[in-house]
Image (cartoon, rainbow, N blue to C red):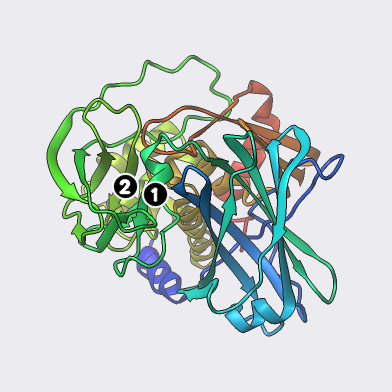
């Protein structure tokens, strides 16, 4: 049997593929209580200006105010990305601060006048920047920002917990662009790229930087309800001192941790990854994410193969009964999901390895997400002949990142999970 270079063709196609974005809206039961929905929704309808995703972060200015940064992804009716002029001409931005996710008391509200001073283009998105004042007698708040399209009234919302009494380093300092103008709302950097750790004032201070050379495990099956082994302690590979507000490069892959003091329990974690990330291109790395749709025997054979690329080609082609075109489509669809998971969910480890990443790769974006202070529920409808299925993720403390979630696992997922995995294995899932 002749095997075509399937992975080579996939890499050629994915290099030309457009960067998919997902969308955030609101499902607020008993509005205006801020129970919010997902940043992952269908593409913008034709003929409309639409917000397709929002991601937010705050940084403390002082004890009385915080600066909010919102990365806004959107589309013109033509499908082109939104410009600053589009945002100011077709949208209104308002916000409300609540005491908590489950508290309807309004602590403050306002609108954001849109102009070139508060909104700037930053690559494939716009960054909106505005300040909010600390509500009286409150140290914390949930900021709910509403971006409304003026012609049809459609709304996109973002919820952002804010701590005005900022004790954490990540409340005051962040990864910034090399020019120090805008924070980067992600937990990864590419090796040897120039980065800056700074606060809103550009303060120069000394931080400790630790590197951990550790290969974290991928997510376990959603049906694996057995207790997990105790977390392993991480051995520090290197330790150096750095200065904030100064250019920095991370020359080696690994998990990096910035702290103010060596005794600090929390800091800023960043994963340094290869130049192609969030794409995966090396055959030995391409093998690993197929764990979620493979048998143990298949994974062992792939891991022990002398030529990873040929073994992976054989793997995909054998699943598709020798149909090369179906195999190519399946490869593109699967690794596009892996790339999106890396963009969306990278925390202290690559996004595809996280619980959210695993669910996203196999099932795709949820139809809606319900989020509270310590929990997210992903809701899928009409999957595997089931009208609705929920996946619950509980937020867990993590010293490296704020957004670490773990899936609540049930054996009852089997009737949904296995048919969808089988659809991947036969090439029935296409994107």
Are circles 1 and 2 on residues that touch, CB within 8 Å?
yes
Q: Is residue 148 above or below residue 232?
A: below
Q: Position of residue 243 (x, y in %)?
A: 19, 51
Please name whichever residue, 92 or 345, is drawn nearer the observer in this view of the structure. Answer: 92
Q: Which quadrant holds residue 94? A: bottom right
User: Which comes before the other along the chain, label 1 or label 2?
Assistant: 1
The C terminus, quarter of image: bottom right
Left or right relative to 157: residue 179: left
Q: Quadrant of residue 400?
A: top left
Label 1 and label 2: CA atoms lie apart by: 6 Å
**What quarter of the picture does the N terminus occupy?**
bottom left
**What percent of the width, then of the height, locates residue 138?**
62, 35
What residue did someone put label 1 on? 187
Q: Which mark is residue 150?
A: none
Mark 1 residue crowding within 10 angstroms, few (<14) / some (14–19) / many (20+):
many
What number is the disc on residue 271?
2
The residue shown at (83%, 77%) is 151
């Amino acid at each position: 049997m002749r095997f075509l270079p399937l992975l080579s063709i996939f890499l050629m196609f994915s290099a030309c593929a457009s960067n998919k974005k997902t969308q955030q809206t609101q499902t607020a039961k008993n509005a205006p209580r801020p129970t919010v929905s997902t940043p992952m929704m269908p593409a913008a309808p034709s003929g409309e200006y639409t917000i397709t995703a929002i991601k937010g972060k705050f940084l403390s200015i002082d004890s009385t105010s915080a600066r909010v940064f919102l990365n806004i992804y959107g589309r013109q009716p033509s499908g082109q990305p939104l410009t600053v002029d589009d945002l100011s001409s077709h949208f209104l931005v308002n916000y409300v601060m609540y005491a908590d996710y489950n508290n309807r008391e309004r602590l403050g509200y306002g609108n954001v006048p849109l102009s070139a001073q508060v909104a700037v283009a930053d690559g494939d998105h716009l960054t909106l920047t505005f300040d909010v004042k600390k509500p009286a007698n409150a140290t914390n708040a949930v900021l709910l920002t509403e971006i409304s399209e003026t012609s049809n009234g459609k709304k996109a919302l973002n919820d952002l917990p804010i701590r005005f009494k900022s004790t954490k380093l990540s409340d005051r300092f962040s990864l910034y662009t090399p020019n120090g103008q805008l924070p980067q709302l992600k937990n990864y950097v590419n090796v040897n790229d120039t980065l800056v750790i700074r606060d809103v004032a550009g303060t120069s201070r000394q931080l400790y930087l630790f590197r951990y050379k550790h290969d974290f495990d991928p997510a376990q099956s959603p049906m694996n309800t057995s207790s997990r082994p105790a977390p392993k302690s991480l051995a520090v590979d290197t330790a150096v001192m750095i200065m904030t507000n100064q250019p920095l490069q991370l020359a080696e892959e690994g998990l990096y941790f910035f702290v103010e003091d060596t005794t600090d329990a929390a800091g800023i974690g960043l994963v340094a990854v290869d130049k192609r990330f969030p794409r995966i291109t090396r055959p030995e790395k391409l093998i690993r994410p197929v764990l979620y749709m493979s048998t143990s025997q298949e994974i062992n054979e792939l891991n022990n193969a002398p030529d990873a690329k040929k073994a992976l080609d054989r793997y995909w082609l054998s699943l598709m009964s020798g149909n090369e075109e179906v195999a190519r489509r399946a490869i593109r669809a699967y690794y596009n999901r892996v790339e999106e998971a890396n963009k969306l969910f990278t925390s202290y480890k690559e996004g595809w390895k996280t619980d959210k990443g695993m669910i996203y790769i196999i099932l795709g974006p949820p139809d809606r997400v319900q989020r509270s202070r310590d929990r997210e529920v992903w809701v899928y409808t009409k999957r595997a002949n089931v009208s609705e299925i929920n996946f619950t993720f509980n937020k867990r403390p993590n010293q490296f990142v704020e957004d670490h979630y773990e899936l609540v696992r049930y054996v009852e997922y089997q009737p949904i999970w296995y048919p969808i995995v089988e659809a991947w294995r036969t090439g029935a899932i296409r994107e």
